[in-house]
Image: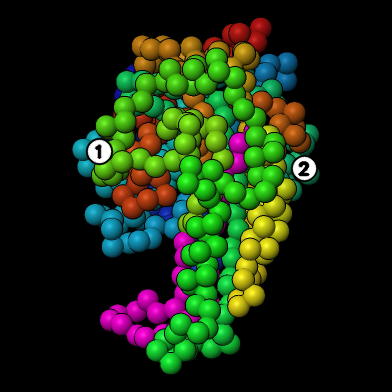
């Protein structure tokens, strides 16, 4: 197997680069055709690798790529999930090379989607090819690769509900998360949920002269800032009533266990070029991103933002706000609590509209399953170290849905690094990580089939 990977190394890189050249930005409808092209690309590659029943399944939005290889109905089935859509690349001027013209620098592939998630999905496509070409696929495999993960996976939910039979499997395998470091392998065993909201604050019926009216009429940007600032207390605890009602507090032992994961604060600060960190009092950084909910402004606009200075008291202000949720918070419930509270704190001098966007539920994935052990042992074999179970701070809403709709547990088999700059300018993915994935995935399959006997 290793020999096959080495012989085909350059082609495995080149194919991924070709895929990365397609700007499959799901958030921007201008790229709808490119999103589809990226789906077709991976469809073709699955066929070439030897998958059966490969098709582009139409949805109300972007198509879902499905494919399978059933070698024996009596053997277990692994359902591999991933996404071929990517985040918008903005701000473009901060990229050192164009986001859709991938380049390899210092043994890393630089491009939007290099790590999240095309690079990690393609590890599975190539690992599958390796197993097919070396006659070593030990169980059944199904692929479901969607094009709307970065915008909330709404149509995937519908697809899953309508295709329960076709998606029948024993475990879900997803490479769309990260690990601690290249010499410290880890496996995420939890993901946060998400409530995403947009707010619009309207003051006077038109933009005003900020001298003629300033000081006497509510400035919606000022008001919005004050409202947002009031959402947290001095300990950075969120002040929305009932917000923490359903949060699962970990036991002292579980917290100690979580904090045993290696974490170097100096490197963390250096990587982000910050003098200090900031977060909820009473929790460590690992806890703040792993087991605690958050509230963050993702974007805010209004008034004059062009060249030079224009003296204006704006009519409107906007913000996009996200809350990361932890078990057992519920996205819909938190969105409602936010809406009720935000409307209640609006001064009479402005009108406030709260528009809910997409959401997703948090998830915990078990470590006491055959699949987890198969993954852990596979990483131990290729990294020479047993991976540490961790909690991921990001969200993959479909994980909770797979459990609810298909009754299936997930293994988050991620090979990225926090420093890969996913969603940021200069996203990249190490060739080390790409090939570690291609090498480790077949070992997972071997272990899983073996242990399922
Ligand atoms: N792959 C990420 C999620 C992720 C990254 C989980 C790193 C754990 C560690 C995924 O593509 C993503 O970005 N999800 C969105 C959620 C979605 C509803 C827009 C997110 O977390 O913001
Ligand atoms: Mn992703
Ligand atoms: Mn993402």
Q: Position of residue 10 (x, y in %)?
A: 30, 35
For disc 1, the neighbor class at 10 Å (few under 14, some 14 to 19, many from 20) is few
Q: Which residue in the protein does label 2 denote?
A: 161
Residue at position x 27%, y 47% in the image: 103
Residue 286 belongs to magenta span: no
x and y, in percent, of residue 180 in the image: 39, 27
What is the CA distance from the residue labelled 2 to the residue labelled 1?
45 Å
**Kind of element beneath mark 1:** helix
Which numbered disc, 2 or 1, marks the residue that appears first in the sequence? 2
Q: Which residue is the site of mark 1?
A: 270
Question: For numbered disc 2, what is the local secondary structure?
Answer: helix
Which residue is nearer to you in this view: 335 or 184? 335
From the top left corner, tell me how far across and down residue 201 is, in percent.
Answer: 58, 72
Instruction: Write the residue at 56% across / 54% down.
Output: 231
Pick the residue in front: 123 or 42: 123
Task: State the extent of the magenta-drawn residues as a range.
Answer: 299-327
| Residue 301 in magenta stretch | yes
Residue shown at the point (28%, 44%) measured from the top left: 274
């Amino acid at each position: 197997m290793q020999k096959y990977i080495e012989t085909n190394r350059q082609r495995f890189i080149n194919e991924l680069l070709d895929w990365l050249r397609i700007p499959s930005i799901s958030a921007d409808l201008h790229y709808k055709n490119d999103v589809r092209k990226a789906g077709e690309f991976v469809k073709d590659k699955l066929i070439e690798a030897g998958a059966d029943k490969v098709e582009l399944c139409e949805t109300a939005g972007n198509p879902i790529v499905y494919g399978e290889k059933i070698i024996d109905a009596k053997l277990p089935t692994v359902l591999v999930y991933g996404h071929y859509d990517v985040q918008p690349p903005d701000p473009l001027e901060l990229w050192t090379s164009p986001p859709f013209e991938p380049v390899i620098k210092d043994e890393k592939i630089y491009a939007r989607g290099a790590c999240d998630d095309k690079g990690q999905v393609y590890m599975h496509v190539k690992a599958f090819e390796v197993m097919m070409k070396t006659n070593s696929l030990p169980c059944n495999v199904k692929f479901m690769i969607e094009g709307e993960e970065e915008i909330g996976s709404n149509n995937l939910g519908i697809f899953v509900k309508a295709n329960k039979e076709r998606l029948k499997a024993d475990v879900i395998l997803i490479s769309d998360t990260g690990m601690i470091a290249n010499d410290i392998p880890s496996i995420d065993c939890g993901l946060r949920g998400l409530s995403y909201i947009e707010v619009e604050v309207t003051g006077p019926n038109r933009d005003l002269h900020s001298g003629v009216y300033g000081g006497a009429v509510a400035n919606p940007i000022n008001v919005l800032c004050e409202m947002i600032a009031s959402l947290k207390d001095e300990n950075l605890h969120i002040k929305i009533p009932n917000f923490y009602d359903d949060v699962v507090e970990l036991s002292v032992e579980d917290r100690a266990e979580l904090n045993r994961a290696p974490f170097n604060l100096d490197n963390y600060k250096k990587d982000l070029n910050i003098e200090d960190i900031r977060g909820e009092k009473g929790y460590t950084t690992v806890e703040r991103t792993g087991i605690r909910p958050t509230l963050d402004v993702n974007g805010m606009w209004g008034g004059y933002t062009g060249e030079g200075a224009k003296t204006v008291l704006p009519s409107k202000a906007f913000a996009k706000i996200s809350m990361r949720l932890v078990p057992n918070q519920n996205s819909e419930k938190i969105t409602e609590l936010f809406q009720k509270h935000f409307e209640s704190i609006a001064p009479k001098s402005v009108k406030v509209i709260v528009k809910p966007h997409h959401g997703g539920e948090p998830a915990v994935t078990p470590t006491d399953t055959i699949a987890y052990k198969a993954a852990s042992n596979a990483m131990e074999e290729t990294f020479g170290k047993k991976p540490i179970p961790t909690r991921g701070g990001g969200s993959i809403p479909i994980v909770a849905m797979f459990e609810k709709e298909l009754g299936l547990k997930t293994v988050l088999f991620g090979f990225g690094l926090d420093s890969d700059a996913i969603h940021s300018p200069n996203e990249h993915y190490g060739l080390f990580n790409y090939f570690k994935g291609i090498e480790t995935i077949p070992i997972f399959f071997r272990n899983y089939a073996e242990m399922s006997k």
